[in-house]
């Protein structure tokens, strides 16, 4: 039992693993902005029960307490002091966030408090080995606020020290409205909690067979999946990182590639581009996408068999997103099938050339940029349906005279 008095814990103690945590002495690799990797130590991960939620807003200078989550199980991951900036802390937090969602031990919902962070911040003069006195910022519930809270606290501590003051070990709260941290209470040491075994709880022994059974059910984790995407699908490290950010997105992408049967890079471009763009615009998760992986694969196949061009595909995708059916239904309904009839394209080119003799003369005099003008004009009269490769080839031939 960890004993302390605070309004969010009505019974006066918290059940927590203390001497025998689930995990000790682990590591996690994070990617930095310059593309390099840094290893962060994980001190321990232990189970404890959650406390209530203090509500500091909308109570006119008072604090409300929401006890709905009090007593529910919580996994606390304690990290080594290996991070040297707010950006590194956020990268580490995002890595943990991805990991717990892949393992399906947490939905990662930060707004509801399923995943949150306490940030311990200290500063020290350059060259000094000993860490400075730390302040703990409690329960920050977004990546953006973690970065802002840490940066504010670093500046605050530097200012205190430079003005001749001393940093007090304390617990602080981040106020997002004012973009500042403020003191909540003095930070307790371990002996202040008067830890002792809970007489109501018997020890639980996990044997090696159980641990191996759990290990066998583990899914492919983000780092391994990312490496496989690079090797199997010839994607860049950046593309692989984006596509494996969540298990659901990675599964969606792989379903598209398998259904198309080829062109993993083209599939990646559509998932990272239009699919992600529409998801962000409508504030949806990949699991709520109106365009299933099968529907997207069907549309990509129509690009590959020259039924539609890449440009027209964007209109088809938008129609699919808006619930107008799969790619074939949209193409038929809107008459978007690409024109590959050489005679029809040639007739349109000749018509445009007859109407624009000066531009024809200019092109033949070496103004190569005018090719774009002719492409645009032909596409206009053909409703954007001319096969782009055919159009370019025929234009060059006819303009050459």
Image: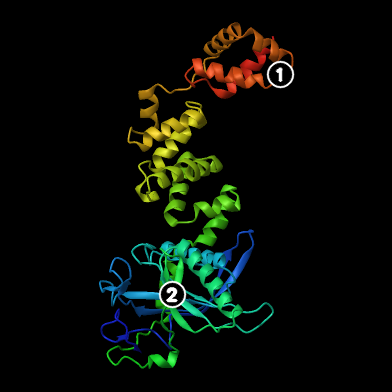
Specify the farthest residue to the top. 354
Q: Which residue is depicted at the point 52% across and 44% down? A: 268
SS at mark 1? Answer: loop
Name the N-terminal-most of marks 1 and 2.
2
Specify the farthest residue to the front. 163
Dot 1, crowdedness within 10 Å: few (<14), some or many (≥20)? few
Which residue is more in the foreground, 31 or 256? Answer: 31
Above/below status of 350 relative to 297: above
Dot 2 corresponds to which residue?
Answer: 182
Residue 329 position, x and y percent, is: 35, 28
Which residue is more in the foreground, 247 or 323? Answer: 323
Residue 255 position, x and y percent, is: 44, 46
Label disc, if present, on residue 367 of the rendered structure = 1
Dot 2, crowdedness within 10 Å: few (<14), some or many (≥20)? few
Q: Which residue is depicted at the point 32% across and 83% down? A: 6
Query: Looking at the image, how many numbered discs can be counted on the residues?
Result: 2
Above/below status of 333 relative to 77: above
- Whole-number angstrom distance, CA of label 1 to CA of label 2: 67 Å
């Amino acid at each position: 039992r960890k004993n302390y008095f605070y309004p969010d814990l009505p019974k006066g103690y918290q059940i927590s693993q203390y001497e025998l945590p689930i995990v000790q002495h682990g590591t996690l690799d994070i990617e930095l902005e310059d593309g390099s990797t840094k290893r962060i130590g994980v001190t321990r991960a232990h189970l404890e029960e959650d406390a209530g939620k203090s509500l500091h807003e909308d109570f006119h200078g008072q604090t409300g307490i929401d006890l709905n989550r009090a007593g529910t199980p919580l996994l606390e991951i304690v990290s080594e002091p290996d991070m040297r900036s707010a950006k590194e802390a956020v990268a580490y937090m995002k890595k943990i966030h991805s990991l717990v969602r892949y393992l399906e031990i947490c939905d990662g919902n930060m707004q509801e408090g399923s995943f949150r962070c306490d940030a311990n911040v200290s500063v020290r003069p350059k060259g000094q080995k000993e860490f400075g006195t730390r302040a703990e910022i409690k329960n920050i519930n977004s990546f953006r606020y973690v970065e802002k809270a840490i940066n504010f606290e670093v500046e605050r501590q530097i200012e205190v020290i430079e003005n001749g003051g001393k940093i007090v070990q304390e617990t602080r709260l981040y106020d997002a409205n004012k973009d500042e941290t403020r003191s909540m209470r003095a930070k307790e040491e371990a002996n202040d909690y008067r830890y002792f075994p809970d007489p109501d709880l018997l020890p639980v022994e996990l044997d090696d067979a159980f641990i191996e059974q759990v290990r066998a059910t583990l899914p492919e984790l983000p780092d391994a999946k990312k490496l496989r995407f690079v090797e199997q699908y010839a994607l860049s490290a950046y593309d692989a990182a984006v596509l494996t950010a969540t298990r659901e997105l990675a599964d969606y992408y792989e379903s598209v590639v398998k259904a198309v049967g080829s062109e993993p890079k083209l599939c990646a471009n559509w998932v990272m581009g239009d699919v992600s763009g529409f998801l962000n615009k409508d504030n949806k998760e990949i699991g709520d996408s109106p365009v299933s992986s099968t529907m997207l694969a069907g549309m990509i196949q129509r690009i590959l068999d020259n039924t539609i061009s890449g440009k027209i595909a964007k209109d088809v995708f938008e129609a699919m997103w808006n619930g107008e059916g799969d790619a074939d239904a949209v193409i038929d309904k809107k008459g978007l099938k690409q024109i590959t009839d050489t005679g029809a394209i040639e007739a349109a080119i000749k018509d445009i050339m007859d109407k624009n003799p000066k531009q024809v003369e200019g092109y033949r005099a070496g103004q190569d940029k005018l090719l774009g003008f002719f492409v645009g004009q032909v596409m206009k009269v053909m409703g954007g349906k001319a096969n782009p490769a055919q159009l370019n080839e025929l234009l060059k031939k006819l303009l050459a005279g």
